[in-house]
Image: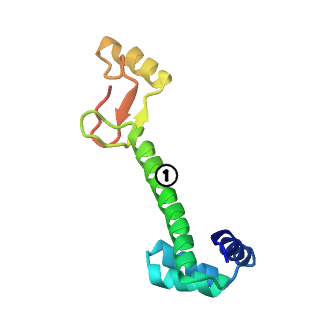
Amino acid sequence: MTVDEAYQKIEQQREKKDKRVVDLNRNIIFDHKEQGIECIQSISGCEHDIAEQIYELYHNKIEEIRNKKAEEKAQKQQYIPKCPTCGSPDIKKITGGKRWITTGIFGLGSSNLGKTMECNNCGYKW
């Protein structure tokens, strides 16, 4: 039996939602190599060396997915605006109407004049 044939048998069982495939996924995710290889052998009926190659294929796929998710998470965190004073991401936009009203009431002494954002944590405006 070749690696491709064994892999196809496993994928067929995955489509049938075989419990052994769920066990295989769990063993791969938690890096239980020997148990994963045993699951592959029980599903496909292949030899140990072929099962080991298939285990490595699945393990590499899981690692790629983990790395991609970590990169996406880092990119999302990178673009969160924060207060320049306290670093809090709890900020809000000062609307144009609010700036007009406070400038009309307080004139040039308005704290909103020329500001667009306000921190809900420390009250800093920029």
Residue 44, position as x, y percentages in the image: 66, 82
Q: Residue furthest top?
A: 108
| Image side of residue 46 versus residue 59, left or right | right
How many neighbours does mark 1 have within 10 angstroms: few (below 14), some (14-19), or many (20 or more)? few
Residue drawn at x 74%, y 75% as measured from the top left: 12
Which image quadrant for residue 109? top left
Which image quadrant for residue 87? top left
Residue 76, position as x, y percentages in the image: 45, 44
Residue drawn at x 39%, y 21% as measured from the top left: 102
| Front-most of residues 51 and 99 | 51
- Looking at the rendered structure, the secondary structure element under dot 1 is helix
Residue drawn at x 42%, y 38% as measured from the top left: 79
The correct choice, above or below, for 124 with respect to 96 in the image is below
Which image quadrant for residue 18? bottom right
Q: Which residue is mark 1?
A: 68
Quadrant location of the N terminus? bottom right
Residue 60, position as x, y percentages in the image: 50, 62
